[in-house]
């Protein structure tokens, strides 16, 4: 075993994203989310590893190419001659760096803390063999994710083909406010006080569960609620859940909850939209939310502070929604159902590959 600090050194970057203006060129520079732009300079002559050290994505590991740079929210990890860079990247990915996070508002991670992490250090030939095996599995994972992205693009394209651009509305579909076609309620406030002693523990949907177009079931929390609260807030199949705030580019994101757990309710930062399906189908409306008419409406009326935007109940009820014929909505729903079957097959394959990668990394690095 070797300590991380024995096989690499760290380097810092003082580049801010605002410094990139007027520096167009041929050398890539990266941030926490990946590639940012090509610029006319670089800081690293050779390939290296980058770690997100501040803010969103903290602890994320990236192996990056020669003649490139990173911005200041990341740090360079430069391997020495005793370790293969791909092997080191996988070893660091396997490490539990989260235990070194510090800071409440903006989390940080420091090399001086996590450099004591240990990793097996076989011969360079053995390291390269291990990295090659993990590369094959990782490449397949990337391909599966690309296939899922392609399916999303196909659904978006089919929506525009059938219903037109939502901003210009070339087919002149009638427009109605959402409240005319849906029952919309906010959820239960966590930590509220109640005099009722007869409480039951039920699952509830939090903001973290509602993504852009899907429900994340990774962690479903529970809450104590009264019977009347459960009756008032319980979710039904095909309800749409929408968040009231977050990053401006994700404002008004929503997803269909197709099979809610029994007695599942939702928190107050989520709106539950129960559609009148004689007018508006969940599949059509969930996709409508991803297009520009809805996105621009929410951005115009949202309350915005630094990096955060939010909408209220009144604004959501006023969402101008295109209402094409139900027959067309049904056709679109059928198309999405077919793509979801393909998506389910790809997801099963993806889960198996991710499980395999996890098992291999445990075998190689523990």
Image (spheres, rainbow, N blue to C red):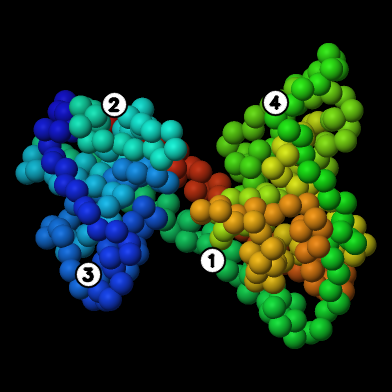
Between 132 and 297, the one nearer to me in the picture:
297
Which is in the foreground here, disc 4 or disc 1? 4
Residue matched to label 2 = 366
Distance from the alpha carbon under mark 1 to that under mark 2: 36 Å
Q: Earlier in the sequence, mark 2 or mark 3?
A: 3
Disc assigned to residue 191: 4
User: Label 4, label 3: how many angstroms apart (C-alpha)?
Assistant: 51 Å
Task: State which tag comes first along the sequence, 4 or 3.
Answer: 3
The answer to which of marks 4 and 2 sits earlier in the sequence is 4
Residue beneath the point at 13% across and 40% down: 8
Within the image, what quadrant is residue 229 found in?
Answer: top right
In 3D space, how far apart are the residues under numbered discs 4 and 1 (Cα atoms)? 42 Å
For marks 1 and 2, the one nearer the N-term is 1
Question: Can I make out residue 343 in this image?
Answer: no
| Residue at which label 1 appears | 150
Residue placed under numbered mark 3 in the picture: 27
Q: Nearer the viewer, residue 263 or 242?
A: 242
């Amino acid at each position: 075993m070797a300590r991380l600090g024995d096989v690499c050194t760290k380097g810092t970057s003082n580049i801010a994203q605002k410094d990139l203006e007027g520096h167009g060129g041929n050398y890539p520079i990266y941030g926490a989310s990946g590639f940012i732009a090509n610029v006319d300079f670089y800081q690293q002559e050779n390939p290296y590893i980058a770690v997100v050290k501040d803010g969103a994505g903290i602890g994320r590991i990236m192996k990056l190419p020669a003649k490139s740079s990173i911005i200041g929210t990341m740090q360079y990890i430069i391997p020495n001659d005793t370790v293969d860079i791909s092997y080191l990247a996988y070893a660091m990915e396997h490490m539990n760096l989260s235990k070194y996070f510090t800071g409440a508002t903006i989390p940080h991670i420091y090399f001086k803390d996590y450099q004591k992490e240990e990793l097996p250090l076989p011969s360079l030939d053995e390291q390269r063999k291990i990295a090659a095996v993990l590369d094959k599995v990782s490449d397949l994972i990337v391909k599966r994710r690309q296939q899922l992205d392609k399916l999303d693009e196909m659904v978006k394209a089919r929506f525009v083909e059938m219903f037109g651009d939502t901003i210009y509305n070339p087919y002149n579909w009638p427009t109605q406010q959402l409240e005319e076609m849906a029952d919309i309620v906010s959820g239960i406030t966590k930590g509220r006080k109640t005099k009722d002693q007869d409480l039951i523990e039920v699952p509830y949907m939090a903001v973290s569960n509602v993504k852009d177009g899907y429900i994340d079931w990774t962690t479903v929390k529970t809450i104590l609620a009264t019977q009347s609260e459960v009756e008032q807030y319980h979710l039904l199949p095909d309800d749409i859940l929408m968040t009231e705030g977050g990053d401006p580019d994700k404002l008004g994101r929503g997803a269909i909850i197709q099979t809610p757990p029994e007695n599942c309710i939702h928190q107050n930062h989520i709106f539950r939209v129960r559609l009148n399906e004689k007018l508006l189908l969940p599949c059509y409306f969930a996709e409508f939310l991803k297009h520009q008419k809805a996105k621009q409406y929410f951005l115009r009326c949202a309350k915005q502070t630094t990096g955060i935007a939010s909408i209220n109940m009144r604004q959501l009820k006023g969402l101008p929604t295109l209402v094409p014929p139900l027959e067309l909505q049904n056709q679109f729903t059928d198309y999405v159902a077919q793509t979801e079957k393909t998506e389910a097959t790809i997801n099963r394959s993806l889960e198996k590959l991710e499980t395999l990668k996890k098992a291999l990394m445990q075998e190689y690095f523990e």
